[in-house]
Amino acid sequence: MEPGTIRERMIKPDCVSPEIALSTWNRGSVSRVANRGDAGVGPVEIFLLQITMTDSRLMQSKATTVGEYLAELPDDRRKVLQAVRTVILKNLPKGYEEGMQYGAIGYFVPHSVYPPGYHCDPKQPLPFAGLASQKNHMAIYLMSVYSDSAVEKWFRKAWAATGKKLDMGKSCVRFKKIEDVPLKVIGETIKRVPVKTFIENYESATKNVTRKRASKTAVKKKTPKKNKPQTKMKSE
């Protein structure tokens, strides 16, 4: 992979838990939360914030299975998400699994394939994509598009070629009806990033950021502190 194609700056190894990241939302934008020095949010936290805090309102389902999640939805939305889900499953590379993750339908690298899990919450498998019904729209979340600029460039070009309007955030593709979605492009996007590549990109990004942060810390420790000049008292 060419240098600079992985967005290392957005993957921070000192991430807080999703619950804490969500508590910092306070009806602000994803970008503002992500830029807070004390929040420590990485791309998956941004991904989760987009899923759960859209329209400044929690949209997490308590369903424990994908079937339960779909059953909760109105008929029109269930049919649309099921159509998108069918395409995702048809093109999902070997090694990824489907399940409920953070209150939405998730596609992830299971611990059986990648034991470390997600570095900010090791109990969670490494997220790859997501599918959710929000208050005012439905959404597909594509971490492979967000984390790799080369994939993003291809994705935007392929979507534009269909003539359909792309409503996209960081990793979130929003839509209101099935006609808004070029299913062939979604399928190809899912299919073009195998598990091995996704893990390699993820680990490369986290290791590089860790190395850079360690280097900055070392420089700070070597820099001697400047003593403040003492103020001389004026004689009366």
Image: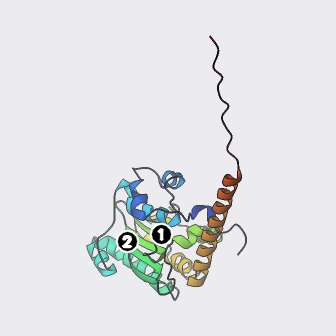
Question: Gap in Å between the C-alphas at discs 1 and 2?
Answer: 10 Å
The residue wearing badge 2 is: 104
Q: Earlier in the sequence, mark 1 or mark 2?
A: 2
Q: Amino acid at mark 1?
A: Tyr
Assess disc 2: are there few (<14), some (14-19) or many (≥20) residues with their C-alpha within 10 Å of its C-alpha. many
In this view, the residue in front, 96 or 185, is 96
Can you identify the residue that label 1 sits on?
141
Location of residue 234 in the rendering, given as x and y in whole percent from the top left corner: 64, 16
The numbered dot on residue 90 is none
| Whether label 1 touches label 2, CB < 8 Å | yes
Of residue 182 and residue 30, the one placed in the foreground of this image is 30
Q: Is residue 209 left or right of residue 40?
A: right
Residue 162 visible somewhere in the drawing: no
Whether residue 212 is visible here, answered yes or no, is: yes
Between residues 31 and 187, which one lies in front from this camera angle?
Answer: 31
| Location of residue 192 (image quadrant) | bottom right
> Looking at this view, is 77 or 120 the one in front?
120
Q: Which quarter of the picture shows residue 218?
A: bottom right
Image coordinates for residue 229, horizontal then vertical, percent: 68, 31
Does residue 233 lie above or below 17 as drawn? above
**Callout 1: few (<14), some (14-19), or many (20+) C-alpha neighbours within 10 Å?**
many
